[in-house]
Image (cartoon, rainbow, N blue to C red):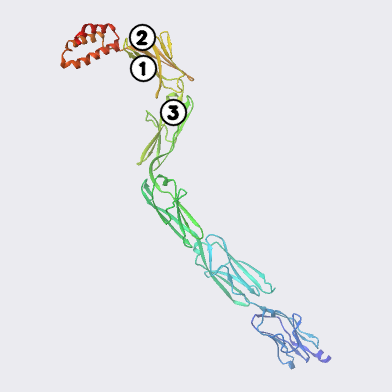
Amino acid sequence: LKFLAEAAYFSQQPLDKVVVAGQSVTLPCVIVGYRGMVQWTKDGLALGGERDLPGWARYSLLGDPASGEHSLVIESAELGDDAVYECQATQAGLRSHRAKLTVLVPPSDPIVEGGPVVRLKAHTPHNLTCRASGAKPAAEITWYRDGEVMHSAIYSKSLMEDGKRETAVSLLPMVPEDRDSGRTYTCRVLNPAAPAGRQTSVTINVQHPPSVTLSVQPQTVMEGAKVLFICSASANPEITGYRWSKGGIPISEANGDSLEVTVDHSYFTDPVSCEVSNSVGSTNVSTLVDVQFGPRLLSEPKPLTVDTGMDAAFTCAWTGNPPLTLAWTKQGSSVVLSNGNTLQLKAVTQEDAGTYTCKAIVPRIGVAERDVTLTVNGPPIITADATQQAVKHSKGKLECLVGSSPPPDKIMWTFGDMNLSSGSSGRFSVQTVNSDRGVVSSLILSETLAQDFQMRYNCTAWNRFGTGTVLVTLKEQGGISSTAIVSSAKLIAPFLHIQTTCALATIIYTYLISTLIVQFRDVRVLRLLFSDQYSTFS
């Protein structure tokens, strides 16, 4: 035996091999000069000395033992066959080289998450994910878009629980656009066990909120005309509803893709909106209407009261379409003081007081205006006729008007050696009346005498800003003399007995008598009339 052992040797020994799962493999072992037991070990575990290797259904020994042939045959290799093998001549103490059998496992069919139709939201970043599991070694993954290789994928792999197979994952970053909808993305995987590769394709369905266009027909109209709004939209998936609003306020009765309305000026500033929805989201589009309308007041000018020497400013704002022009004027003058919204008056005087007009003009459409009053506080401004008239021996009156602001604290009439601001003194009395033009002060003479027409009358007013004064003279007014009235009465009286003219004569006579009583209060004339003619009249 010692001789046999010393002479025995391996003429063939197993070598490292690579086999694809499912294929058969033979690990050679030929020992020359040995007739004893031969066994194989797998990762150090003895498989047994029998030729049919009981307990290992797919394992067997191949060859003629008498010729020293003890090759190991493995049918339909599996991942579990992936190990280190050794052929041993136990009685001779011979061991072959250790042979590493590597079993390659092809990847499973790749899986693209979300397939076969991947629904993506437009403009939202997304990673297309392809996963290939159970491969040994890990599968290589390549992406194609409509047959074109994509180079931007991110690759990773991880060992599975069995410690031998691996899972490979490839992420293809993309920001889907509407044009990507319908494109085909293919994930192709391969490894040495599947050199032809396997692939899975998916179709991209890019979903997006509605794309909306809002138009109005016609675009330019006069106020009070009808217009039609048309809301055109495309969407994926389909549109689920329309919602209309004006100036942010919903129009409840509108729910379709068009809206017909009668427009007023508000459609020029308050946009009409159409909001279209689907399951992905909604899109809101707004538009204004070019409504042409006359001036409309936005901000009314406010009256001002300022002291003399101060600045004053009025503001009024209008809107209109086409664009309007503004003009500020002062009543009584056609001079344009300003064309802007604001009228600035510097260091005003009492002459600046009055009514100012803010006028808006919309070409070819219309004109509108607003008045505003400027009151300037200052010393009293007194106006009066320099010469006023009265009939001698009748009631007389002199007037002056104090029209400034603030109202006068006191108004006094001065004439001769008299000063009178209110009440009565002899034949003279003062009355004060407020009017829309100011304060009217009247000096009343119960009966005018000759000397009254020789004096000057001074009307003076005071307020907290100072004084004002005006001089007035009284002029005798020509009237019907008593001699003329008596002569007329005497002329008419003889005819008063005629019945046909009795009524007319009575009217004339009554008028003459009343004229004497009111204007002359001359008792002598009355006596003359009654003594000479009354008997005839009777």
Relative to 30, residue 118 above or below: above
- The amino acid beneath tag 3 is Leu
Graded by Cα atoms within 10 Å as few (under 14), some (14 to 19) or many (20 or more), the crowding at tag 1 reads some
Q: Position of residue 367 (x, y in %)?
A: 36, 38
| Badge 1 element | loop
- Distance from disc 2 to disc 1, alpha carbons, whole Å, reads 17 Å
Q: Position of residue 514 (x, y in %)?
A: 27, 13
* Front label number (3 vs 2): 2
The residue under label 2 is 452
- Residue 374 is labelled as 3
The residue under label 1 is 385
User: On the picture, is 395 further left or further right than 266?
Assistant: left
Relative to 56, residue 229 above or below: above
In this view of the protein, which residue sits in the foreground, 530 or 227?
A: 530
- The amino acid beneath tag 1 is Asp
Q: Is residue 409 visible?
A: yes
- The amino acid beneath tag 2 is Asp
Which label's residue is closer to the chain start, 3 or 2? Answer: 3
Q: How many marks?
A: 3
Quadrant including the N terminus:
bottom right
